[in-house]
Amino acid sequence: MLWTVDRSRRAQGSPTRSGTVRLDRGVILRAAQEICDRDGLSALTLRRLGNELGVDATAMYRHF
């Protein structure tokens, strides 16, 4: 699945020719780990994860 990502955000996926970033398991898990390390497990939500990756929170729901 491809989602448009704000390039100023932390997403570290593989860029495609169209400028989108592939949200894959590794990218999502790294972002989730960063949130948990920085702010604690209780801070991890799909909305917060979407914000961290620079995508709409609904992209997280669609991805899963």
Image (cartoon, helix red, strand yellow):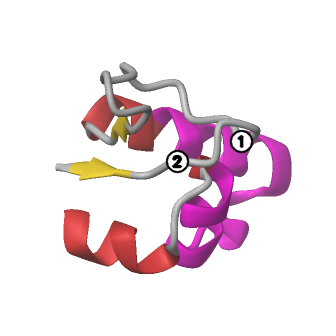
Residue drawn at 22 percent across, 63 percent down:
63
Write down the residue under mark 1. 9
Q: Main secondary structure of the magenta part?
A: helix
Would you say the residues marked 1 and 2 are in contact, meaning their CB atoms lie under 8 Å apart?
yes
| Vertical arrangement, residue 12 with respect to residue 8, above or below | above
Q: Is residue 4 left or right of residue 42?
A: left
Q: Which mark is residue 5?
A: 2
Q: How many marks?
A: 2
Residue 51 horizontal/vertical position (percent): 66, 63
> What is the three-letter code of the residue carrying label 2?
Val
Residue 2 horizontal/vertical position (percent): 25, 47
Tell me the element at label 2: loop
Residue drawn at 72 percent across, 69 percent down:
43
Q: Residues within 10 Å of mark 1 (few under 14, many from 20)?
A: few
> What is the three-letter code of the residue carrying label 1?
Arg
Of residue 26 and residue 39, the one placed in the foreground of this image is 26
Q: Quadrant of the C terminus?
A: bottom left
Magenta stretch contains residue 59: no
Q: Is residue 44 left or right of residue 57?
A: right
**Residue numbers of the magenta segment:** 30-52
Magenta stretch contains residue 31: yes
Residue drawn at 41 percent across, 43 percent down:
28
Tell me the element at label 1: loop
Residue drawn at 31 percent across, 22 percent down:
17
Q: Gap between marks 1 and 2, in whole Å?
A: 8 Å
Residue lying furthest front in this view?
Answer: 18
Q: Is residue 41 left or right of residue 64?
A: right
| Vertical arrangement, residue 58 with respect to residue 50, above or below | below
